[in-house]
Amino acid sequence: MKPNILLCSLLMLAGAVKLQAQSLFNKTTENKITTLIRQMTLDEKLSLLHANSSFTSAGIKRLGIPEIVTSDGPHGVRPEHGRDWVLDEGVEDAGTYLPTGNTLAASWNPQLGYRYGAVLGSEASYRGKDIILGPGINIIRSPLNGRNFEYLSEDPFLISKMVVGYIKGVQDQGVSACVKHYAANNEEADRGTVNVMMSERALRELYLPGFKAAVQEARVNAVMGSYNKFRGQYATHHKYLINDILKGEWGFRGLVMSDWGSVHDTKEALLYGTDLEMGTDLMLMYNTVSQTAASGGPAKTDYYSQFFMADPAKKMILDKEIGVAVIDEKVRRILRVMFATHMIDGKRKKGSYHTESHQQTALQVAEEGIVLLKNQSGLLPLSVSGIRSLAVIGENATRENAMGGGSSQVKAKYEITPLQGLKNYAGKETEIRYARGYKIAKDQQADQTMIAEAVAAAAKADAAIIFCGWTHGYDYSKWDNNAYDAEGVDKPDMDMPFGQNELIRAVLKANPKTVIVLMGGGPLDMSAWIDEAPAVIEGWYPGMEGGNALAKIIYGQVNPSGKLPLTFPKKLEDSPAHKFGEFPGLNGVVHYKEDIFVGYRYFDTYKVKPQFAFGHGLSYTTFAYSGMSVQPAAKGVILKANVKNSGTRDGAEVVQVYVKQNQSKIRKAEKELKGFKKVFLKAGEEQQIEVLLDSDAFKYYDEGKKGWLTAPGSFTIMAGSSSDDIRGERTISL
């Protein structure tokens, strides 16, 4: 390919993206906003910039400006909370509980991402919510991050493709999405204090692309700042991250919202990009009551007026320390979002709630996101006619997850557990015996009585299924060692808790036809039993229809097509953040010493064999690749390949396209994901797929020149079924 074709394509593409970002809000709207701002008093302007209850910010009734009502979360509209965060009673807030973010990402299906977002937007609109606090797209840097289940991937390209559909799905319903947490929020336990240090190249190549896609491709209306510091300054009011990059380089014109309580300084918040300060009054209330009690003075009740962007901001304005224009600009951004979502004219469509269509979307996401990790000797799918008795083991078989995880909790209209799903599918034909096997409790020891009961059930059955893995914490008061996947906590290690390893080994010995189904937010150490286990499924937290989806996959009604959106290491020390990086930080600082070598970039480059590779996922059929070619195109290059379902079952394959620069003067990963295509094929069917690799696929960030460059030379374009299963490659020169 000639270099000038690539460069011209780059310039055209960059120009188009910039125009999209700038056209998000039109001139007519800007004039209306200017008129409204001119009619506001200073107090009215400031009232728009901070919370007035746990999940709302004030409106201005006399001007027809409503409150903004926000709601978690990433995979369902959160239950209603009163002013003091107590769940409301007697309200219709039991809705659709979608599979968690990592399940959606494992589908590798951006179109499904749009449907997922549309469910959220529709149900939020029905419930009177204006902003959905999602999606969460922080890079999965370590297996221990307690919030990985909400996030999408370790790879910025996969995140970028999945996030666009999600956001457009939400916002096409007239509700704003709020992409979070900007930026570098990759650990939970010390998120409010940790200072993240990383190279500029790592920031640009890994940690920001998803947010950039959210702004410039999806046109997201809101961005949430994160709790952590970045290079010494809190990320929620950060000159470089927000003013220079988000609002400057990317042209973001929506509002920047704080995470709850993530503002720490009035002047920095005003000057460095925060537009709306959200948070609870509980801690402020406690501090104020304590202070007034100690001084003997009168008790204060208007705690929200003491937020950083309330009375303290007013004082700075009156003292001429900050100009009113700073406030006006923030008000303008908030009003833009209101106009974009028809909050002011009242023309937003009503939306719908826990409909059959929404439930079907939840089911399809689970079906496409569940990953078949191992299937030795074709144990799966099980046969209803061949398996007359089945032992179902494990507390995760009966555990509901909707109300777990902290801020992502959803009050589900119903939730099909794995055990119920199996009964729904095979219960009339198969005798199903359940044994608990282990107990989720603070006591981490194996329960020998429960193990004995599980072994007895497995020994008498034609096959056994163990539902095991991680667990959510259920509410803020229970953030203890029962909570492994939850906001505000990180896992202590990758070891399976509650004596599950001992249980699995015992059951496998009693019945070799045992399927292991892992539930939870990501990888765990399987070394104690993986060699003996014939079949392993990653079930994630699969939502309200998860039990039905798992049963359909286990029995083969649905052919699994999920692919891992993150690498599963064999042991924790193999993960790059732990191998030569830091997790968590030391003395309040975390250095990302692994740099750009996160996930498969590390495993492939440093020749470390994972337990299961990025992009891995098996099927009940087989796929053959042929006829691969790479050709110049107007906007880059196009990879073409023939993909044939060479097996006997209908199924779907995700063709993953990786790029490697063969010689480079700078450190580069062995290969990087730059394209993918999910193709559904009937048995024996063959299709030619095309994947566009635009000019960005060949770029790296040059820290010296502070920009993106394409290093000339030879590149290998690879197509495969996972990062460690490459089926074909071609070499081109730029």
Image (cartoon, rainbow, N blue to C red):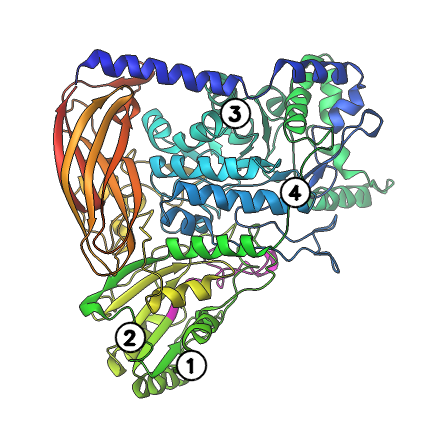
Name the residue that disc number 3 marks: 238
Q: Position of residue 710 (x, y in %)?
A: 24, 19
Report the mark closest to the observer, 4 or 1. Answer: 4
10 Å crowding of disc 4: few (<14), some (14-19), many (20+): many
Magenta span of residues: 467-485
Among the two numbered marks 1 and 2 on one chain, the one whose residue lies closer to the N terminus: 1
The type of residue carrying mark 4 is Ser
Q: CA distance from mark 3 to mark 2?
A: 52 Å
Name the quarter where the C terminus is drawn: top left
Q: Secondary structure at mark 4?
A: helix
Foreground mark, 3 or 2, reads 2
Which residue is depicted at the point 35% across and 33% down? Answer: 206
Disc 4 to disc 2, C-alpha distance: 45 Å
Badge 2: how crowded within 10 Å, few (<14), some, or many (20+)? many
Q: Residues within 10 Å of mark 3 (few under 14, many from 20)?
A: many
Q: Position of residue 465 (x, y in %)?
A: 35, 74
Q: Which mark is residue 125?
A: 4
For the residues marked 4 and 3, what is the alpha-carbon distance in whole angstroms? 32 Å
Decide: few, some or many residues near mark 1? Use Cα within 10 Å; few <14, some 14-19, many ≥20: many
In this orientation, which residue lies closer to the viewer: 156 or 377?
A: 377
Task: Answer above or below: position of 149 versus 114.
Answer: below
Q: Which mark is residue 514?
A: 2
- Helix, strand, or loop for circle 2? strand
Residue type at the position of mark 1: Ala
Label 4 or label 2, whichever comes before in sequence order: 4
Measured as percent of width and height from the top left, residue 274 is found at: 60, 26
Q: CA distance from mark 1 to mark 3?
A: 53 Å
Q: The N terminus appears in which quarter of the rendering?
A: top left
Q: Circle 1 sits on which residue?
A: 435
Does 481 appear in magenta? yes
Give the percent coordinates (x, y) of residue 695. Answer: 28, 22
Direction right: furthest residue: 298
